[in-house]
């Protein structure tokens, strides 16, 4: 899989960031959700999945991108 940078609102090269893959999907770089209460609200999280939190404003890059 290859990633194409779409955009970030962060400074200094730190997350969160959005990428488009060559498979037609989106990859999100963000803050790992570790709060037990939040994780308790999640349904069907597989062992190979995780949750990340990003600012809503970052989603504007999902349809724009280069």
Image (cartoon, helix red, strand yellow):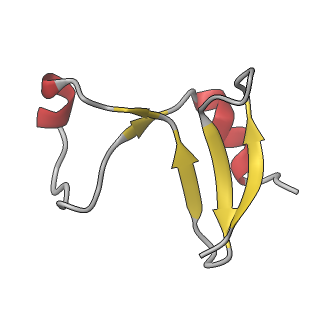
Q: Is residue 31 left or right of residue 36?
A: right
Residue situated in front as seen by the camera: 16 or 63: 16
7 shown above or below 35: below
Q: Quadrant of residue 3?
A: bottom right
17 shown above or below 49: above
Residue at 57% from the left image edge and 27% from the top image edge: 55
Q: Quadrant of residue 9?
A: top right
60 shown above or below 33: below
Residue at 19% from the left image edge and 43% from the top image edge: 42
**Residue at far right of view:** 66
Q: Is residue 59 left or right of residue 45?
A: right
Residue at 24% from the left image edge and 29% from the top image edge: 34
Residue at 16% from the left image edge and 50% from the top image edge: 43
Q: Quadrant of the C terminus?
A: bottom right
Q: Quadrant of residue 2?
A: bottom right
Residue 35 point in image, percent of width and height: 21, 24
Q: Quadrant of the N terminus?
A: bottom right
Residue situated in front as seen by the camera: 3 or 57: 3
Residue situated in front as seen by the camera: 53 or 42: 53
Please tell me how many numbered marks the rendered image carries: 0
Q: Is residue 63 left or right of residue 56?
A: right
Residue 26 point in image, percent of width and height: 59, 60
Residue 23 point in image, percent of width and height: 61, 79
């Amino acid at each position: 899989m290859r990633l194409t940078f779409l955009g970030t609102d962060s400074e200094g090269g730190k997350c969160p960031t959005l990428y488009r893959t060559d498979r037609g999907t989106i990859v999100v770089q963000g803050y790992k959700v570790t709060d037990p209460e939040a994780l308790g609200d999640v349904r069907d999280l597989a062992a190979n999945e995780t949750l990340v939190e990003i600012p809503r404003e970052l989603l504007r890059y999902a349809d724009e991108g280069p």
